[in-house]
Amino acid sequence: MRIGVLTSGGDCPGLNAVIRGAVLKGTKIHNQEFIGIRDGWKGVVEGLTMPLDRHSVRGLGKQGGTILGTSRTNPFEGPHGGPENVQATLDRLGIDALIAIGGEGTLAAAKRLTDAGLQIVGVPKTIDNDLDATDYSFGFDTAVEIATEAIDRLRTTGESHKRCMVVEVMGRHVGWIALHSGMAAGAHAILIPEQPQSIDQICEWAKSVGDRGRAPVIVVSEGFTLDTMESAHSEKGLDAFNRPRLGGIADVLAPIIEERTGIESRATVLGHLQRGGVPSAYDRVLATRLGMAAIDSVMNKEWGTMVALRGTDIVNVPFEDALGGLKTVPQERYDEAAILFG
Ligand code: F6P
């Protein structure tokens, strides 16, 4: 068989380790041939490829980014999109099966293509850790490590000046990165999309820390919103929160906290730092195992499924299970973290 491998959606530390795991097991154990598809679904639609063999994956496990490149192209859009065109391109390239490594959008596209008869297996990827069908996704551990180190550093400068440090981490829809990095770094408040909070509560946490002579550290997910009851009042200082903005939420929260508590405040948005650089050891191992399991799925012709982590085992689940909904932070996990706030 000739197997195409693609990475799609936002990049994530560990993508190269998946590619390496799949290619090494696929060539050494199953004697299969690989071809790299460049720039995600764009490469499938436009027929962009690169060689992918045992030699090209040497030393790749610890390398950040993706050697294949990525994009957010939808394979159903454009004049060459859609299942028939994609199948024709794969036939022209002599590709029998695809391993698609990506997040929710990638897997949703893979499901639609598989439903139309294409031979695809998936590998879940997201630093946000929000895919329901897998206990952890690679990239998350690395992002948490980076965020934790950044928060530790911000704490010491905050303490020197007795400033409130507001740190924004990634997580558009869910607060896993904020929850884990905030807990690990001992944040005085963690603000996540699943748990809207009032500005009064946030300021109360900051003030109680300031009152004991310490510098508050507040970790906020990029997707956090203020409690709707309170933000509807559009009180002084809250208008800024509700207005469309170019900067992050931390940039809006910090001045409001400063105004209301009298504690000088600073905002830091970590942004794509959390997706760059080498993967953690945990992510390298998880990603490698998922890549190896994906090639097993191909050999077993388990089209329309993706590999996933359940406990410590790698299992195989249908795409629809992976697309069933976001894995949000459960109430009890937030309540547990909140014991440490203030
Ligand atoms: O989904 C992963 C993620 O890193 C989110 O946490 C973030 O909101 C988004 O991607 C950023 O996307 P982009 O790299 O396209 O700006």
Image (cartoon, rainbow, N blue to C red):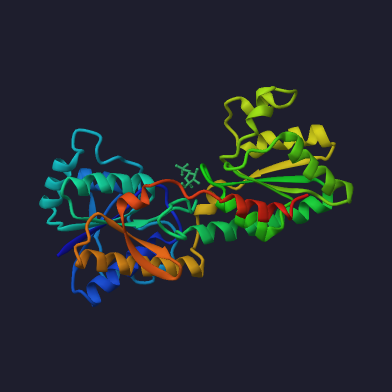
Compared to residue 186, the image places residue 254 above or below, namely: above
State the residue lying farthest toward the bottom: 29
Residue at left 23%, top 33%?
A: 78
Compared to residue 219, the image places residue 186 above or below, namely: below
**Horizontal arrangement in the rendering, residue 208 relative to residue 318 (left or right):** right
Asked which quadrant contains residue 202, the reply is top right
**Horizontal arrangement in the rendering, residue 165 relative to residue 210 (left or right):** left
Report if residue 60 is visible in the image: no
Residue 110: give x, y in percent of width and height. 27, 48
Quadrant housing the N terminus: bottom left
Residue 115: give x, y in percent of width and height. 20, 47
Residue 300: give x, y in percent of width and height. 20, 67
Report if residue 33 is visible in the image: yes
Query: 133 or 18: nearer the eye?
Result: 133
Residue at left 48%, top 54%?
A: 129
Compared to residue 271, the image places residue 242 above or below, namely: above
Residue 325: give x, y in percent of width and height. 42, 46
Residue at left 43%, top 64%?
A: 63
**Horizontal arrangement in the rendering, residue 135 relative to residue 120 (left or right):** right
